[in-house]
Image (spheres, rainbow, N blue to C red):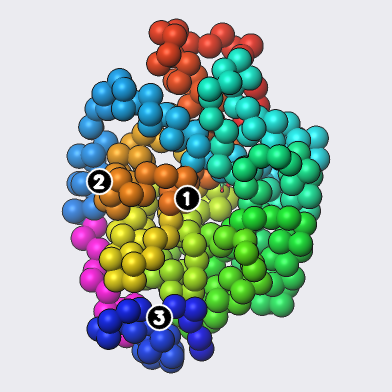
Amino acid sequence: MTSSLVLPGDETDLREVTASESALRRFLHGLPGVDQVGVEKRVAQLGTRSIKTDAKAWALDLAIRAVDLTTLEGADTPGKVRSLCAKARRPDPADPDCPPVAAVCVYPDLVAVAVDALQGTDIDVASVATAFPSGRSSLDVKLADTRMAVEAGATEIDMVIDRGAFLSGRYGQVLEEIVAVKEACGDAHLKVILETGELATYDNVRRASWLALAGGGDFVKTSTGKVSPASTLPVTLVMLQAVRDFASVTGEFRGVKSAGGIRTAKDALKYLVLVNETAGPEWLRPDRFRFGASSLLNDLLMQRNKQRTGHYWTPDRVTID
Ligand SMILES: O=C[C@H](O)COP(=O)(O)O
């Protein structure tokens, strides 16, 4: 078993931690337990925070810049992906100051279409891979899926962990898959989807986050959007604590992507408050925090417009996300 990561200092050396299944289990089960009541209370408290007008305008723009504009439907077509890319480039065609989103996220077979449509921009093309959303396939198939997306031009890969293996305690297998997919990514960034709605406990979310980080994930991502519950504020808090603690031990900054079920600007702002208060303001940037969302952008744009003009858009200004 190998890890791409060596922790500085000698208290926790992930080379040793990941050297054997038993050491890995000891490490993951030795992580402090999550105080469920405390986490939920903290989220409820932060949810009541109001944001001042200036900060709100800034936060709405940040939220737009942090969106991975997503379409992951069996019925997706090149035409739909092109429309989405046009929206990603210029979310509000009437306002040249409106920032573009961070990335467009699609299935592997539509990566080339997105790459072509986003030429000349800094917008990333993210592809789900590794037998998304279930992750139920052989490692060879998962690696082939990843390579296909990267060869087509994906700059970000959103993999899923094998939840069956994780819940059975086969942590070494999960880690090895993450390490292998990271290698197959080459220069593309790797987001590791935990599918928190299937992990049952916050302790498992914390353990899976550390596994993903130890395996070289650039981001830990909550959900596929195909399982309910998808992203929640409490699981995001636990994941933010993991990247914060990982950074304090290793000096390496990794990101969190909250994905699935986030549809309103009001909720997006609650997430940004949570990021600020849990990981810190250093994480309030699109390379350290993302929203994976298929239908959040329109509400962000409507609230942005309301903020600037004092009135909402008329329905004809709203296009598909
Ligand atoms: O990764 C992103 C999710 O699939 C999007 O989920 P959503 O359709 O609930 O926004």
Segment tinted magenta in the rendering = 24-36
- Left or right: 162 in relation to 204: right
Answer few, some or many: residues within 10 Å of disc 2's Cα (few below 14, many 20 plus, some between 14 and 19).
some
Q: Any mark on residue 106, and which? A: none
Q: Which of 131 and 1 is in front in this view?
A: 1
Question: For residue 28: magenta?
Answer: yes
Q: Marks 2 and 3, how far apart in space? A: 28 Å
Q: Which residue is drawn at 61% across and 56% down?
A: 156
On the image, numbered disc 1 is attached to which residue? 287
Along the polypeptide, which appears first: circle 2 or circle 1?
2
Q: Main secondary structure of the magenta part?
A: helix
On the image, numbered disc 3 is attached to which residue? 6
**Callout 1, which amino acid?**
Asp
Using the rendered image of the protein, determine whether residue 279 is visible from the camera's viewpoint: yes
**Callout 2, which amino acid?**
Glu
On the image, numbered disc 2 is attached to which residue? 277
The quadrant of the rendered image in which ligand 1 is seen is: top right
Q: Marks 2 and 1, how far apart in space? A: 18 Å
Using the rendered image of the protein, determine whether residue 222 is visible from the camera's viewpoint: no
